Amino acid sequence: MRQPRRWSVSGSLTDLVASGAAERGAVTVPTRRGELRFDLGRTALVVVDMQNDFCTPGGWLASIGVDIPPARAAIGPIAALLPELRALDVPVIWLDWGNRPDRINLPPNVIHVYDPAGIGEGIGAAHDASPAVLTAGSWGAAVVDELEIAGTDICIDKFRMSGFWDTPLDSTLRALGVDTILFAGVNADQCVYATLIDAACLGYDCVFLEEASATTSPAFCLDATVHNVDQCFGFAVSAAALTTALTKGRPSWP
């Protein structure tokens, strides 16, 4: 009988690389609970919602009085990580709100979250810089200028807090042979977290990248998110530590 995929644990090291698997390149990084080893040949980076409406002055969140510098803090760590992962052929997936202009596929609970007062300033609304908040093809739905989307990257529109509902994210990851997902973006405690939880429930190995995941919520929300990821859904890893490990290890990998 074929044996199911399992992690192995030795001392403080948790190894996600399947026993006997052909590795294109394994990397080991520190976590909050020890060390983590995973196979880059079975890994993808999912960057969530690094969009103008969330992260750019003049975007939607800024227009309704949200302090956006905390969200922008993720830009630098993501930018530093992208070339290292691309150099090792790790797929980069941009997972962003890209709603229909008529919002026909959005349930009421999604619309309410973004317009709790019911005054028409949420998804699809217009403001000075954006004619249609988080609508596919709009300026507000575009990824911030500071983060480059390469020709080899994959872009997927989402329509819920979790990027797995009503999207091809799961089928794309499975077609790429991905077991391990690195998560980055905003808001860490909302769309990043919801997508990560669904990924864990679908059986993916989940790595939450600290520094590269940010939020405009109060600090305790991020603290709780990191705690719950570590406790129940995967591993919390410093984006800077991963970038360093990739940079140092690249010359020795095939």
Image: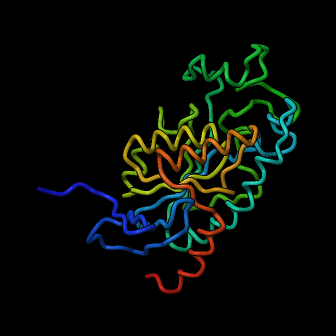
Q: Which residue is drawn at 85% across and 40% down?
A: 67
Closer to the camera, 187 or 233?
233
In the rendered view, does 221 fall on the left or right side of 130? left
Closer to the camera, 39 or 149?
39
How many numbered discs?
0
In the rendered view, does 178 fall on the left or right side of 122? left
Find residue 123 and report its horizontal and vertical position in percent: 70, 26
Q: Which residue is drawn at 59% across and 68% down?
A: 242
Picture quadrant where residue 236 is located: bottom right
The N terminus lies in which quarter of the figure?
A: bottom left
Q: Residue at x 43, y 53 (%)?
A: 205
Colour scheme of the picture: rainbow
Q: Can residue 139 be seen in this view?
A: no
Residue at the farthest bottom position: 252
Find residue 158 and report its horizontal and vertical position in percent: 56, 37
Q: Residue at x 51, y 55 (%)?
A: 235
Picture quadrant where residue 200 is located: top left
- 3 over 222 or under it: above or below: below
In the rendered view, does 47 fall on the left or right side of 143? left
- 4 over 200 or under it: above or below: below
Q: Can residue 46 be seen in this view?
A: yes
Residue at the farthest left position: 1
Find residue 34 and report its horizontal and vertical position in percent: 51, 65
Closer to the camera, 168 or 78?
78
